[in-house]
Amino acid sequence: MRMRKKAHLDRRMERQSARLVERPEANRGRWRELLDGCREVRLELGCGKGRFTVETAKAEPEVLFVAVERVADAMVMAMERAEAAGLSNVFFIDGDARALDGWFAPGEVSRVYLNFSDPWPSNRQAKRRLTHPDFLRLYAAVLAPGGEIHFKTDNRGLFDWSLFQFPKAGYALKQVTRDLHAHGVSGVMTDYEEKFYREGKPICRCVAVKGETLSARLTLTRPQPEHEAAVWIYRQCFQDVQEPCVGAAGLEDAADYAAWRAAVTDEAVKANTFIALDSGGEMVGAIRVRREAEGPWEASGGQVAFSVRPDRRRRGYATEMLGLALAYCREELGLTRVLITCADDNAAAARTILHYKAALEDREADAAGRPARRYWVTV
Ligand SMILES: C[S@@+](CC[C@H](N)C(=O)[O-])C[C@H]1O[C@@H](n2cnc3c(N)ncnc32)[C@H](O)[C@@H]1O
């Protein structure tokens, strides 16, 4: 009986194979290519039987919707609904949302929908909640600056808990309500939502916005006159430990701030130097990005170089800063892949680069003759 059920499911899945993305990692950085004139990419995580995605996609044909669901029996119904509606802007991933950053490039997604996610009420299972800080960090890695998470649930406990998690993870909250349909049906309903609504259960909803110019905690900016004090403290911290300020374009040797700033903001220089400021305005990192997709630098240095203030390491700043820079490479420079190098013995830098699913190209000597690793990252 079980075998027959499985064979039946397989046949139904097969009929929908054009919508099922079997190897989502192969589309990383290229999802927009699936839809002519695609305006943006949105995800629904845990789409169930797909009513929400299908109805929303009908109303916005220029948006590409990718629905993720780990239970194939439910997802096949969602795919059949998309098929019946004749939609060409909906695709499906049969998998666990935990793998999201392997499927989508930094900044590739504009919106994530979490509709009636499983509440996992016991503390032991908190890590499985789709609004757990680990998941919120994952979404920040793929969302564009200003990207949004739209969260709906009937579970008041999960909602109140999540309202604390969003700001802690660096999102700003808006449109918070604990009774979405108080004045009549508002927006597209999901399958679960319709059932709860009929039972008279109030629905909670909020929108969490990823910071406008940054990821969760940092602002990446070109150095301005008002940043002089922060930049000079940064330089002093590196002098104290006798390390070069990698990614800061010779800051350690600069005669004065004005001259350094003029040099790094000169448009003739084919690289942009950014400083990363924390919420208190302190400079915690520097990152330099070469604007050209190709160049002699490929043979020696990489396209991106970065450093984090020695006393601010091991807090995830490097990962966050690199995520912002990769989004910049993709959105502003139109690059599809980026070469990043690090010293062969710098395990922390290698870990940061590998966070973005980098592929090791080779080990070569850098400009100073030191052994270095060269990685390509698809953005
Ligand atoms: C309670 S149902 C809600 C379904 C649908 N969103 C709705 O509102 O009708 C939650 C769905 O999320 C899926 N889900 C939960 N955690 C998931 C994860 N980590 N990755 C993918 N799907 C997940 C479950 O399999 C289930 O189908």
Image (cartoon, rainbow, N blue to C red):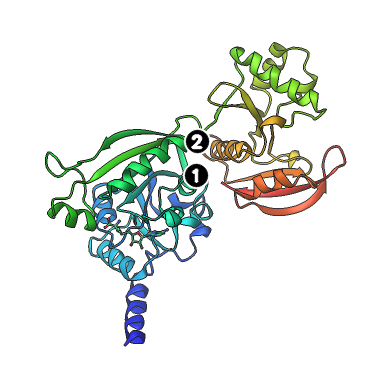
Q: Is residue 142 left or right of residue 254?
A: left
The residue at the far front in this view is 123
Given residues 255 and 118, the one toward you in this image is: 118
At a point 23% along the width and 57% down the height, the residue shown is 192
Question: Which percent across, then down, holds residue 294?
Answer: 68, 41
Residue depicted at x 65% and y 14%: 228
Which residue does the image show at 37% across and 59% down from the upper left? Answer: 91
Give the amino acid type for the residue marked by disc 2 in the picture: Ala
Extreme residue in the bottom direction: 1
Q: Is residue 11 left or right of residue 263?
A: left
The answer to which quarter of the image holds residue 249 is top right
- Measuring from the top left, give residue 359's x and y in whole percent: 66, 54
- Residue 104 in view: yes
Disc 1 target residue: 137
Q: Amino acid at mark 1?
A: Arg
Badge 2 element: loop
Tell me which residue sits at (21%, 51%) in the image.
189
Along the line of sight, which residue is nearer the eye, 192 or 45?
192
Characterize the local packing of mark 2: few (<14), some (14-19) or many (20 or more) Cα atoms within 10 angstroms.
many
Q: First in sequence: mark 2 or mark 1? A: 1
Q: Is residue 273 visible?
A: no
Is the residue indicated by label 2 positioned so its CB lies within 8 Å of ligand 1? no
Q: Quadrant of residue 210?
A: top left
For the N terminus, which image quadrant?
Answer: bottom left
Mark 2 and mark 1 in contact? Answer it, CB < 8 Å: yes
Q: CA distance from mark 2 to mark 1?
A: 8 Å
User: Mark 2 sits on what residue?
Assistant: 216
* Circle 1 residues within 10 Å: few <14, some 14–19, many ≥20: some
x and y percentages locating residue 107 in the rendered image:
49, 42
Disc 1 element: helix
240 vs 43, nearest the viewer? 240
